[in-house]
């Protein structure tokens, strides 16, 4: 006779969302990228020079960002030269 404790195993492991942790959505180098739908980002990093970033709510950034720093800003447009890499995170 089986008791409720001895029932079959069901995996109900929940993925734990950790605060201030990010998943890479895309990495842009020598390309133009316009994130839409499920590819929207919530943060980004930049390394190198020769990029243009446009915020989701407007505004444009073409330089002056610290390389490797995480910026919590959603982007609607990313253009990166061959000397720059922009990593988008969610």
Image: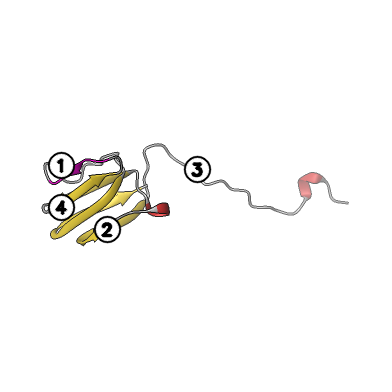
Q: Which of labels 2 and 3 is toward the front?
A: 2
Q: Main secondary structure of the magenta part?
A: loop
Asked if the residue at tag 4 contacts the one at tag 2, i.e. Cβ–Cβ closer than 8 Å, the answer is no
Circle 4 Cα neighbour tier, 10 Å, few/some/many (<14 / 14–19 / ≥20)? many
Q: Say which element carries label 3.
A: loop
Q: CA distance from mark 2 to mark 3?
A: 30 Å
Start-end of magenta stretch: 58-62
Task: Report the residue marked by disc 1.
Answer: 65
Q: Nearer the viewer, mark 1 or mark 4?
A: 4
Numbered disc in front, either 3 or 1? 1
Q: Earlier in the sequence, mark 2 or mark 4?
A: 2
Considering the numbered disc 4 on the image, is that residue within a helix, a strand or a loop? strand
Query: Gap in Å between the C-alphas at discs 2 and 1?
Result: 19 Å
Q: Which mark is residue 16?
A: 3
Give the numbered dot on residue 74: none
Compute the Cα span from label 3 to label 1: 31 Å
Identify which residue is drawn at 84% across, 50% down. Answer: 2
Please identify, in this view, whether the residue under mark 4 or under mark 3 is nearer the observer. 4
Q: Are marks 4 and 3 in contact (CB under 8 Å)?
A: no
Q: Earlier in the sequence, mark 2 or mark 3?
A: 3
Residue beneath the point at 27% across and 58% down = 33
As drawn, which residue projects farthest toward the front? Answer: 58
Q: Which mark is residue 33?
A: 2
């Amino acid at each position: 006779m089986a008791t409720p404790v001895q029932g079959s195993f069901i995996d109900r492991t929940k993925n734990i969302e950790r605060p201030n942790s990010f998943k890479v959505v895309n990495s842009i180098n020598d390309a133009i990228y316009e994130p839409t739908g499920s590819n929207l980002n919530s943060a980004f990093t930049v390394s190198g020079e020769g990029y243009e970033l446009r915020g989701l709510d407007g505004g444009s950034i073409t330089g002056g960002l610290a390389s490797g720093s995480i910026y919590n800003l959603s982007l609607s447009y990313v253009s990166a030269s061959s000397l720059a890499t922009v990593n988008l995170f969610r």
